[in-house]
Image (cartoon, rainbow, N blue to C red):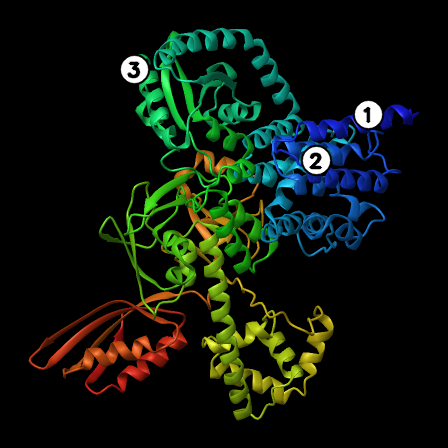
Amino acid sequence: MIVDLELENKEIAKQYKELLRISYQTLSDKDKKMIRLAFDTAVDGHRDQRRKSGEAYIFHPINVAKIVANQIGLDATSICAALLHDVVEDTRFTLEEIERLMGNTVAKIVHGLTKISNLKKDKNISLQAENFRKMILTLNDDVRVIIIKIADRLHNMQTMDAMPEYKQVKIASETLYIYAPLAHRIGLYNVKTELEDLSLKYTEPQRYISIKGKIEESYDKQENYIRKFSKFLSQELDKERLKYIIKGRSKSIYSIHRKMLTQNIPFEDVFDKFAMRIVFKSTRAKEKLFAWKIYSIVTDHFTPNPTRLRDWISAPKSNGYEALHITVMGPQNRWIEVQIRSERMHEIAEKGYAAHHKYKQGKQKDIGIESWLNRLQEVLENNSGNAVDFVEDFKLNLYAKEIFVFTPKGDLKSLPQGATALDFAFAIHTDVGKKTRGIRVNGRLVPLSKELKSGDQIDVITSENIKPSKNWLDFVVTSRARSIIKSSLNEEKKSLSEEGKEILRRKLKQLKISMSEKTITQMLLFFNYENSQDLFYRMGIGTLDNKQLKNFASVYQNSVLNFFKRRIKSNKKLDPNPSSEITEKFDQIVFGKEKEPLAHSFANCCSPIPGDSVFGFITVNEGVKVHHKECPNALTLQSNFAYRLIPAKWIDSSSEEYSVVLKLSGIDRKGLVNEVTRMISNTKNVDINKINFDSHDQFFTGMIQLSVRNKTILNKLVITLLKVNGIDKIVRE
């Protein structure tokens, strides 16, 4: 490929001038000097590099900077960082040189962008998930890192034609998976829309071309309709001497595609292919008044759909979005959405984060993007799971629709749709969530799993004696709550494993066995546990009893270790430094909401293994068959035999809690019930669910429903209770 360098240099200079001209922010002379220095550094660094298309590489950072400057509207610092985003990774320039030339802030953002790209290849992790995790974690440093990364991804999507098809599909899928939802959450609606449309272009090209063609075909009809609608409204709005602009806005190709899929309808049956937007001039103080005035004018002449009213002015979205949305029956009996915004609201909708900060005033209540970022930071700090779980938890809150609920004092809180009472407790404060004993919704006590609705008023009851349990994970949907619960459970496991280690040391001493690294390795082989922490933990909760230890001691002492030597040679190598993470030993499948073990067999079509996501299918002749959720037959079974499916999941039976009923009887005395409840409360891994005592003629009967981890713990508790003065008999139901 022959390149005219003179023409190319002229084009580079032209692009640079355009970058300065289109900037959303007003650039001072100092800003322009800083941008020029960043531009010269980028040109110097990338001077010998070219893209797959053959064009000079420098065009890429310039275009990313243009997106950052105009479409997203960030400041001069961000423009500089965008120009330099690939310099440290791909050229001779070091981070120290960038810091010396551009200052600490630019260097920090460039470093954040470089951290995302530098990923060690490890066959034991999902590279994609790990990469996403690294990217999300940079939110802790500076949100501008993520925004520039989104701009970088947008330009890559715009220029993918020269790439092989498999790469196009991979990059487009990644974009739909995380980048578009991130752009949505930060409030970059235009960028989000373009990312989605471009992704569809490469993942489903035929569908993209078809929808795009049909939109273009119906363009003239749409424009005529918009003109008629606008003309009529303008006459009415002019009477009120309002200053405004009416625009028509087509739905994106991707959103039409989604609507066709979810509703299973052709293009022609998608009724809301476009919307009207009324943008009015107003002072900040009168925005709400004018918005409802326009609403009144529109609904006076066109019948509104009351179920489709959305007031995002009184309660803005968590990304700062404000507007009034109504759907009315327009001319020709067609439903049409009308969006009512002030110029300020429109800017925030278009520019998101940048405009949010432009209009932020003094001690303005923080209900926008910063609030979400603050909550997110806590999630990131508490998260210790694997990369795949981390990204899945994070994604839960990206596209989630919002509900608005109230604290007892009347403060407004936003939560994702589907959030539970327990999610609310963790949204208030980490410690409130951890110590939640009960929750009142609208003055009535409700289960922790109660799904909240907009308008609910919630009061959390706390207790110092309460701590998170594993089943809480089934009660929450927000990534923040899940992260804190998992972290708390891990801490408890680590504490129990430390206790278990000391118990094991004492028990082995009684059996005349010293607890060495060699002994632990042999015990892991004997009991088939993953690592030492797993062994200590099961000792701490009482799963490993004296009988099992004696069996081990017998083999240990009588076989002169030949047994172990053979096992060690034939077995896979054990990690000499076992992980401090406690691994779950999936050894049982439970079914239904009650988590009951049922007789079952495994389906040959997918052969699920311990830990897989599974479901149960009730067959005609073979009982319950367990299938992998990604089984090739899963879709058919779900579509045709939904009534025969039962939820199922793998569990670690040693860490599950079981419900047990104990019946007590004996001679009544003052303080007996109090002593019994105190003894149970002081027993680890035991909780009281229900208690009832009756006394007659100095004889009592009692019923206690408990949650216990295993039989060993229950037997120890029964022995302890039988020592209580007055208790004669305890029977398990």
Question: Residue reaching furthest right?
Answer: 2
Q: Is residue 641 visible?
A: yes
Label 2: few (<14), some or many (≥20) within 10 Å? many
Residue in front for this viewpoint, 571 or 330? 330
- Image quadrant in which the N terminus is located: top right
545 relative to 612, above or below? below
Q: Is residue 240 above or below residue 525?
A: above
* Residue annotated with mark 3: 300
| Vertical placement of residue 233 versus 359, above or below | above
Q: Secondary structure at mark 3?
A: helix
Q: Secondary structure at mark 1?
A: helix
Query: For the point 50% across and 53% down, which residue is it?
Result: 601
Residue 65 marker = 2
Q: Is residue 156 visible?
A: no
* Dot 1 or dot 2, earlier in sequence: 1
Q: Which residue is mark 1?
A: 11
